[in-house]
Image (spheres, coloured by chain):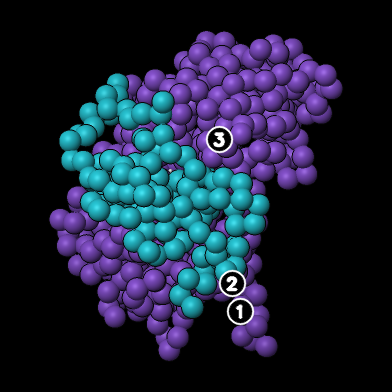
Amino acid sequence: MTSRIINHPVLDKVDDTDIVTFTYNNAEIHGLRNESLAAALLANNIRTLRVHEESGTPRGIYCNIGHCFECRVTVNGLQGVRACLTPVQEGMTVSSGEKFLTPVKDWRSNNE
Amino acid sequence: MNRVIVIGAGPAGLSAAITIAESGYEVLILDEYMLAGGRLLGQLYEEENGKWWNGIKESKNLHDKAIALGIEIRLGTPVSNIEKTDGSWVIYTDEETYYTHHLLLATGAAEVPLPIPGWTLPGVMSVGAAQVMTNVHRVKPGNRGVIIGVNVLSSAIAMELKLADIDVACITLPKKNQVNKESGNPMDVMNSLLHVSHMAPSAFVKFGSKLMKNEFMKKMGITFFPKSGVKMWDIPIMLRKAVINIYGENTVEGVTIATINASGEVIEGTEENISADFVCIAGGLYPLAELAAVAGCPFYYIEELGGYVPLHNERMETVLDGLYVAGNITGVEGAKVAISQGVTAGLAIANNLSGGKQEVEIKEAIKRIEHTRDNAFIQFHPAVKEGKQKLQQYWEEYGQQAKVEVTI
Ligand SMILES: Cc1cc2nc3c(=O)[nH]c(=O)nc-3n(C[C@H](O)[C@H](O)[C@H](O)COP(=O)(O)OP(=O)(O)OC[C@H]3O[C@@H](n4cnc5c(N)ncnc54)[C@H](O)[C@@H]3O)c2cc1C
Ligand code: FES
């Protein structure tokens, strides 16, 4: 089981009392307020965030800091949201990344 | 419009903003991440004086100082494009468009991916991803991991995983292929490993690295490198093995490794499986400079700096008017160097705004970068100083060229 590191020999203890509830593919999930969606899901042992648009093979986080776009999910109806950059909030509706019109998204064309 | 804009709230961007605000100018920082601190957040290691470098605390100090100075920091704000129109810089984000005369790019570095069969399985992540999960989010990337790629970053992060009580089965090499020629070659890896020996508490590795400072001994070192590997922080480092495949049904279940010879070729029939529920890929770092590229900065490839870097001078000014760079976008180094570069860029900007009041301070700040570099605990490339000299040379040549063009 993947789990949280509450106590650490050097870093401060984690405050794990501020819990929020959200849904992932309709299942109820508990996370800590403002932690990333990717972290909250992993703490619940969920690694698969989407399936590849063409081959259907599963994908999870890769870089965890917003560079690779492997962690795209749908949040409150908005597609292509990076789970590693998104803070978890109470009542969020999250689902696995869905098929894009163009399989590869170029982040530089976001503003078009 | 008089407000300075900084892209990136890492150590370079925060330090620059603090310096600018201290000189009395308004600053706005934009960052796509959810916390300020950039890649400093995940850093954790014991320095030679026995003190811990705690990235979370260092980031918080910089952040709090910035806020106290009235600096506005907009997180969760990815910048998708920048351009110069009508004499000012235009910054595009998902929601708003910003304008400024003085723009600093402090976007840091990114990790080089190493494509290995099976690397798209959930549970395979970059080594930096595991660092952030463990130290920043405090969620275990898994219970037992294999790290592919032996370099400064993977050695440091392996130790951080151990600290958090996460089992690291081994650190080993990727199978050599067209893409990863260097990171798959034991000789090159040995060179980089010698470089981290001061971080290793293991006497064997320390002794070994002194012993192996010449080419012949290095080659011998690999040939005699025990197949089961030497240990650093009690983690076997296997330079005689390489991962040829990552396997698992829907998530990682393990890796297949095989013995390799001194030039990195796989010896057939030596394959064996190691079980793991996560795999970290450590391909090294490169400067993240897309925005400087779309702005039209000239670029130079400098291996010692980690890849393509935008041309800039010692004051962190690019050749484009009002565009500055600081931190890892100018070459991959540790956070302390990024901080001193940020201070220098901040002074250069304040100086341009004030009509030359910070000249003396800038000279001192430039010297401080050198000093910080000389005393750096982590050095991603042993010849980084030479890389910086090359860039300076390019800057001077570029200036000459520009002058010639003007006279013609
Ligand atoms: C994964 C990783 C792990 C590292 N680990 C270590 C380590 O353990 N020890 C060490 O000494 N060094 C480490 N480094 C090197 C590290 O880059 C430096 O130590 C230091 O953090 C560089 O500071 P910086 O301010 O230049 O960039 P960063 O700290 O990387 O900060 C850059 C900031 O810019 C933001 N950004 C980038 N692009 C955009 C955009 N388009 N729009 C909005 N915001 C953007 C990022 O979100 C980030 O917050 C690591 C680097 C990486 C990439
Ligand atoms: S994991 Fe790479 S962008 Fe989220």
**Mark number for residue B403?**
1
Q: Residues within 10 Å of mark 1 (few under 14, many from 20)?
A: few
In the image, residue B99 sits, relative to residue B292, either above or below, namely below
Task: Report the residue marked by disc 3.
Answer: B251
Local secondary structure at mark 1 = helix
Ligand 2 neighbours mark 3 (CB distance < 8 Å): no
**Mark number for residue A46?**
none
Task: Report the residue marked by disc 2.
Answer: B399
Say which of B203 and B31 sits in front.
B31
* Residue B129, visible in the rendered structure: yes
Of label 3 and label 1, which has the lower sequence position? 3
Relative side of B267 to B340, left or right: right
Could you tell me which residue is drawn at 55 percent across and 19 percent down?
B169
Ligand 1 neighbours mark 1 (CB distance < 8 Å): no
Q: Please tell me in which quadrant of the rendered image residue B120 appears.
A: top right
In the rendered image, residue B223, in percent from the top left (x then y), is placed at 77, 16
Q: Residues within 10 Å of mark 3 (few under 14, many from 20)?
A: many
Say which of B408 and B223 sits in front.
B223
The cyan-tinted chain is: A
Image mark 2: chain: B
Relative side of B59 to B303, left or right: left
Q: Please tell me in which quadrant of the rendered image residue B122 appears.
A: top right
Image mark 3: chain: B
Q: Amino acid at mark 2?
A: Gly
Could you tell me which residue is drawn at 30 percent across and 74 percent down?
B353
Q: Amino acid at mark 3?
A: Thr
Task: Using the numbered discs, state the Cα–Cα distance from disc 2 to disc 1 in whole angstroms.
Answer: 6 Å
Asked if badge 2 and badge 1 are on a common chain, one would say yes
Q: Residues within 10 Å of mark 2 (few under 14, many from 20)?
A: few
